[in-house]
Image (cartoon, coloured by chain):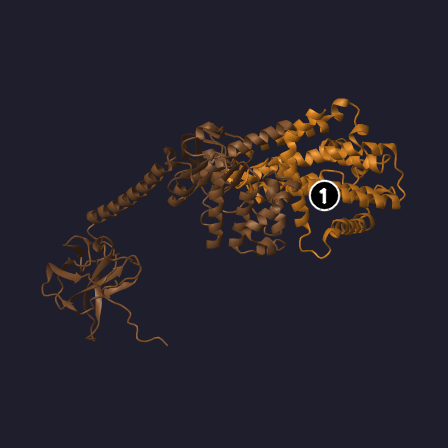
Chain colours: A orange, B brown
Amino acid sequence: MNTLKQRLKDRYGYAMTVLRGLVKTDFKMRYQGSFLGVAWSVLKPLMLFAVMYVVFAKFMRMTDGTPTFPVVLLLGISSWQFVTETVGIGLRSIVDRGDLLRKVHFPNYIVVVSASIGSLISLAINYVVVLIFAIFMRVEFTWRVLWLPLNVLELYIIALALALMLSTFYVFYRDVLHIWEVLQQIIFYAMPIIYPLSFITEKHPEYSTIANLELMNPIAQTIQDIRHNFIAPATQPTVWNTFGSWWVKLIPVAITVLLLWFGVYVFRRNSRRFAEVM
Amino acid sequence: MTQAIEQHDAAADEAAQVVTIDNYMEQPVVLDVNHVEKWFKLPTEQATGLKQAFINWTKGIKGYKKQQVLKDVTFQVHRGEFFGIVGRNGGGKSTLLKIISQIYYPNSGSVHVEGKLVPFIELGVGFNPELTGRENVYLNGALLGFTPEEVDAMYDDIVEFAELEDFMDQKLKNYSSGMQVRLAFSVAIKAQGDILVLDEVLAVGDEAFQRKCDDYFTKVRQDPTKTVILVTHDMSAVKRYCTRAMFIQDGEVAVIGDKESVAERYTLDNLEAEKRKKEQERARIANDPNAYPNGLNARCPLLRTYAISSPMCTTSDRFRFAVEYQYDEPGDFYIAIAMNDIRRGGITFDSGPKRFKMKHHGHHVAIFEIPLALFNDGEFRLIASLRTPTPGDGTMTDAVAVALDDNSCTFVIRDKDNKDSYALINDRSLEFVEIEQR
């Protein structure tokens, strides 16, 4: 046991030291020079939630009619925000830290991981805010909440894999940033986040098969799982309760694994050349 | 525990023995560079984008050309050595240093490093301008693999060495560039690494700081546990600090071993390069009828000063020299001669513009002489110019041509009676006369 601990320390001790240093710096930099400082990390999601609640739930009435829909909406949006933040910052992280990579040798995947840890902290804060809203709205929690860590892990893996992959491409081709921005919009509207899936299936039953395909997207699958397990098991459709065949149910998970493998593969293959190319 | 103490004793025993060129082989190898080859792809198209990549791909253009920077470099550095790497710009030194530091990877061959390596490359270790000096030290420490606790232990040392005690809580963007470099350098040398890799650091900081670095280098070369690899252009530094040195030329190890011979080879190589450049310039002028050496032109294609007596003089000599010219335009013209003091700077003497009126047009020679009894030891240069009267001004002249560079003439005064040659004029020619003391 002790030797295992020692071996882990030998292998990842350096990486952990670097990670700690970078995360600390990133966190300091994020609220650098702002008057309210760290308070923004709670204030910002609160204010954004307020705006979205008023726009979507009150004015546009994009609701499935259940009383929990506002919280479900917030949960979906904050989860999606985590993905965009991780990929958005992670994508630029290698290039942004170029001067560092050119001067010191350190495990450079840490740069991307540290960007994702920052977003993970924001996600945790957002979830606490959502939880407060949920309690306020008298949501009844079930044992399914226990699944949450696994769902969040999957979401994190997807975001990290995308960040690793895109940050590598970005070193070579700066077009990637713009492509991702467009792609991000497409992915967002191709997922039942600001609209409930029932919105389509009920109004246009002929499209319901296609609509259900949206759940094949691992990001959609994960976010739906999080909503289902966290707040609304009764109203939120997931892959697990929409499709019958296990082969179909496992497609999003398979995509996630594939994405992680590909992200790590691309990054490792090219990371040696980062210092030279930049 | 006892084992640790024994080890410590062994280290103390070793400490008594300074690593030199005679005994370095007894120490273990800490850096093993094995047949390293490195080439870069230099993009021929500047644009980095998908469009360009696609266009190149469809046209079958590679979009880059291969530049070989290092060819089969092999050497070993032993523990405790102060190893110098010298070479001309573009010779591959910095690339080699980056490969040693594992920032670049070799295309073939291998690099093996034993122990913790701390690089100091390209002035600065990647500081963040928005963080304070203190935070930057900790971040930098983390990047080098030191935990905050380990940085705590060396923090005071770093700050003291950088002489920045009062500035550590200031943001780095408020530092002067000299302060930033000082801090970065202090982090590099005070970090408890085993191998220190330094690139061109001798130009860092003001004189006081450089003296401090000098002290540090002198101390560290006595330390058999610390290994330093230094890239520099300063041969005196190589001679002062290094146990061994290596001269890299065109990506290959030209000489490795004794620092004196490496330094000599490097100086020689530089002189040769300079000579080659001059020869090229001369060849260009010889081939091109429209090209004239610096200072000359079509009106006066030839003007040069050369020694007739030996250029090695004593104060009892008179230095005799000639001015050769080619000038065909009608009208009066003059030769003016200025004597420059190479060692001390400034113009020692000048003939004045209208002192020597030339009698003959065409290609001729005028002979001059100057007594040297006044001067201390020194190196002097005579620069002649050919001048014509300024229209409408009887006292002034305009220079038509000036004999510069190769066309000027240099002579040296060396006299055993000149004891202290600090001043220009010797003590036999001039003295202060004391009048009175009150």
Name the subunit of mark 1.
Answer: A
| Image point (55%, 53%), residue name | B163
Q: Residue B199: x, y in percent?
A: 46, 43
**Foreground: B215 or B259?**
B215
Residue A17 location, quadrant: top right
Identify the image quadrant of the C terminus of chain B: bottom left
The amino acid beneath tag 1 is: Gln
| Image point (57%, 50%), residue name | B160
The residue tagged 1 is A81
Badge 1 crowding class, 10 Å Cα cut-off, few under 14, some 14 to 19, many 20 or more, is some
Q: Residue A73: x, y in percent?
A: 80, 43
Is residue A181 shown above or below B414? above
Q: Residue A106: x, y in percent?
A: 58, 37
Residue ranking furthest to the left: B360
**Foreground: A171 or A19?**
A19
Residue B422 location, quadrant: bottom left
| Image point (48%, 54%), residue name | B208
Is residue A37 rendered to the left or right of residue B268? right
Identify the image quadrant of the N terminus of chain B: top right
